[in-house]
Image (cartoon, grey):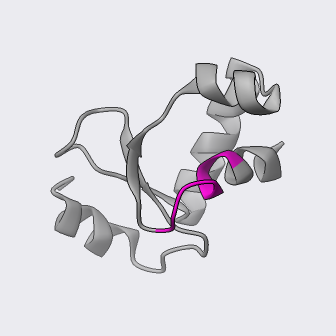
């Protein structure tokens, strides 16, 4: 399931900021909300998704490869 959620995010360019939509993931990939939220948490933990609260609470920056220093990226995005 994590790969399907990664694919949902990967349809946008790496480094692209966008609002996360479990409803869109369900419509496009058939991913249920609970599965989506769990996979999203894993992708955040591994550095593929970085919060971008400067845009809003549901906005993230997606990286195709995990970011090594998530704290640095979050500071740059205004999360800290």
Q: Residue at x 51, y 64 (%)?
A: 13
Relative to residue 13, is residue 39 drawn left or right?
right
Q: Nearer the viewer, residue 21 or 45?
A: 21
Image quarter (top left, top right, bottom left or bottom right) of the C terminus: bottom left
Relative to residue 23, is residue 57 drawn left or right?
left
Which region shows up in magenta? 8-14
Residue 10: % across, % down: 63, 58
Q: Nearer the viewer, residue 64 or 39?
A: 64
Q: Is residue 13 magenta?
A: yes
Residue 36: % across, % down: 69, 31
Q: Residue at x 61, y 26 (%)?
A: 24
Q: Residue at x 39, y 69 (%)?
A: 70
Image quarter (top left, top right, bottom left or bottom right) of the N terminus: top right
**On screen, 63 above or below 59?**
below
**On screen, 66 above or below 32?**
below
**On screen, 69 above or below 28?**
below
Q: Is residue 70 magenta?
A: no
Residue 52: % across, % down: 28, 50
Quadrant of residue 38 in the image? top right
Count of numbered labels shown in the rendering: 0
**On screen, 18 above or below 79?**
above
Relative to residue 39, is residue 60 drawn left or right?
left
Relative to residue 42, is residue 44 drawn left or right?
left
Q: Residue at x 67, y 45 (%)?
A: 8
Residue 18: % across, % down: 39, 44
């Amino acid at each position: 399931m994590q790969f399907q959620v990664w694919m949902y995010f990967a349809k946008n360019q790496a480094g692209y900021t966008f609002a996360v939509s479990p409803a869109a993931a369900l419509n496009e990939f058939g991913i249920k909300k609970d599965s989506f939220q769990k996979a999203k948490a894993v992708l955040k933990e591994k550095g593929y998704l970085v919060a971008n609260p400067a845009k809003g609470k549901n906005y993230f920056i997606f990286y195709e490869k995990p970011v090594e220093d998530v704290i640095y990226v979050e500071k740059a995005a205004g999360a800290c």
